[in-house]
Image: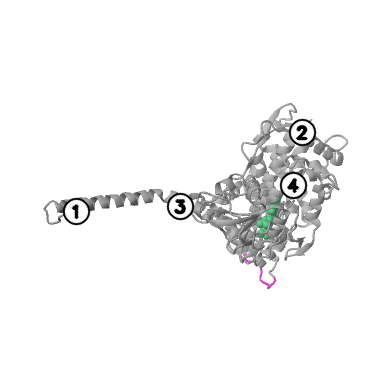
Amino acid sequence: TNYSEPWAGYLVQAQEQIVSASLSRLALLFVINIPLIAVGLNVLYQMLPRDPSLPPLVFHWIPWFGSAAQYGQDPVEFFVSCREKYGNVFTFVLLGKRVTVTLGPKGNDFVFGGKHTVVAAEEVYSSLTTPVFGSDVVYDCPNETLMEQKKFVKVSLTTDKFRQYVGMIEDEVTQFMDNEPAFRAYQTSNTNEWGTFSVYKTMAEVTILTAARTLQGKEIRDYMSKGFADLYHDLDHGFTPLHWMFENLPLPSYWKRDDAQRKMTEFYQSIMNKRRAGNPDDYDDVMASLMVQKYRDGRPLPDHEIAHIMIALLMAGQHTSSSSASWALLHLADRPDIAELLYQEQVEHFGLPGGGFRGMMFDDLKKLPMLDAVIRETLRMHSPIHSIMRYVRSDLPVPQGLAAPSEDGVYVVPKGYTVMASPALSQLDPLYWKDANMWDPSRWLDASGFAAQARKQYDESSKVDFGFGLVSKGTESPYLPFGAGRHRCIGEQFALLQIGMVISTIIRRVELRYEGPFPKPDYSSMMVTPQQPCDILYRRRK
Ligand code: HEM
């Protein structure tokens, strides 16, 4: 080209325009395709040779998001399908976190029995619990402090207290059935009329009322219909997987959560002030006990810590107990033959000659094998907490025998990962349980059977005191509904009493039926609940 020609300038201009148009098109294409490029690079990355000491990585298309959809929709099914491909130990990506799952009894032991200096609960749970419970308690304090706080509460969870609670729980359930519009067919005394009640809604209400009357104290129970229930709901709506993943978002549910937390704390504080102004010795409940106890270093619990522990107890016991009681009633409604056995057990132990029943005592509860079996079997099939997690603070070798050893010997879970166990899976695993997916309380009645042995192992395996009394040390049992080790549940005995009393009180009064396909588990909230609607039919007993 002769650039001195007059038309050459136009040519150069045209060339430049073509180049710049192509570049901007390329840039646009690049921007549009960033997600595709990210997916491609993510897939390529997964195909590269991996460090053989790392547990296998579950294949996923979308970086950061990982396997969140499959895990969130049905964690148990997700674990089963991953186990088929990768074995008992594998890592999956969950919204930017690398989570190593360890399945089976040995996997449970690995997570529950891990040393606290190596695997920690607070780093995993605090973003969810601290805004709801409040500061300086549970996962917002050193683990040693949590152990002391658990001890403070356990002081109030004694057999003596439980003896008082039995009548209170029966009374609350009776009042509820006598007054709730959903139980109109029961209230009319017409023994031929069937009514329905939403089991999950009803159990949620009964659980909070009974917990308020017993653990939370008189003032909270009295305030339940005057605003406390609304505060609880706002707090509860801030206790979801979204709030766990993103601690603070500019959304109404977050503002309401924070507002409810503050108001609830103030409410507990005002109760303490009133009690101090009167005669504190008039009270004999969890709050009264927290008000007089001291940490090992002699420090009394500040009021805000007492308030936050009370909130933590309320939240820890609410969905766990209400969903367990709901599942138990659903199964009883679905299996009238088993409900009848349970009813006959009540008649045999408490039936009065002229009809009706005598009140139950705490010590009676231990003599009711059918009731016990119904609750144990329900907890086996419907563990409210499906995943137990800990943050890995330093590289953690996976014991041989838990996973097939990698080429280099053992898998190592790197620092910064999360480890996860799922007793919910081992409790449903056909490897351990005959007819694992069948709700069959009778499996607990055979003292030499597998279930009874698993329970014995859970209750009686080697014990250790982490600071709040003796607990099983992190057992290898496939049955761990209340966890194990230093984070083991302290509410177990109370929950068994509460659920047992709720079921007995209802079963004494009404027959139950369930029609339609049995509800599936709903994993979308923090606890496993029955999918709604789940209405139970009932009829007043003759
Ligand atoms: C811990 C289950 C009721 C208070 C736990 C854990 C499980 C569990 C599995 C261990 C969590 C972990 O290791 O990360 C249940 C079930 C319940 C129930 C299935 C009812 C059916 C209650 C009640 C209370 C309560 C009624 C309170 C009165 C606690 C506390 C912890 C705990 C304070 C200790 C948390 C820690 O140390 O990190 N529960 N729970 N639970 N639970 Fe429960």
Sequence-wise, which precedes: disc 4 or disc 1? 1
Residue 464 spot, x, y in % from top left: 76, 64
Q: Nearer the viewer, mark 4 or mark 2?
A: 4
Can see residue 345? Answer: yes
Magenta part, dominant SS: loop
Measured in 3D between alpha carbons, the distance from the residue under mark 4 to the one under mark 3, in whole angstroms, is 40 Å
Q: Is residue 33 shown in magenta?
A: no
Which of the two discs, 2 and 3, labels the residue nearer the N terminus? 3
For label 2, the crowd category at 10 Å Cα-Cα, with few meaning under 14, some 14 to 19 and many 20 or more, is some
Residue under label 3: 38
- For the point 69% across and 68% down, the residue is 294
Q: Which mark is residue 155?
A: none
Residue on which the image places disc 2: 336
Residue 431 image label: 4
Answer yes or no: disc 2 within 8 Å of ligand 1. Answer: no
Quarter of the view holding residue 123: bottom right
Callout 3 amino acid: Ala
Q: Amino acid at mark 2?
A: Pro
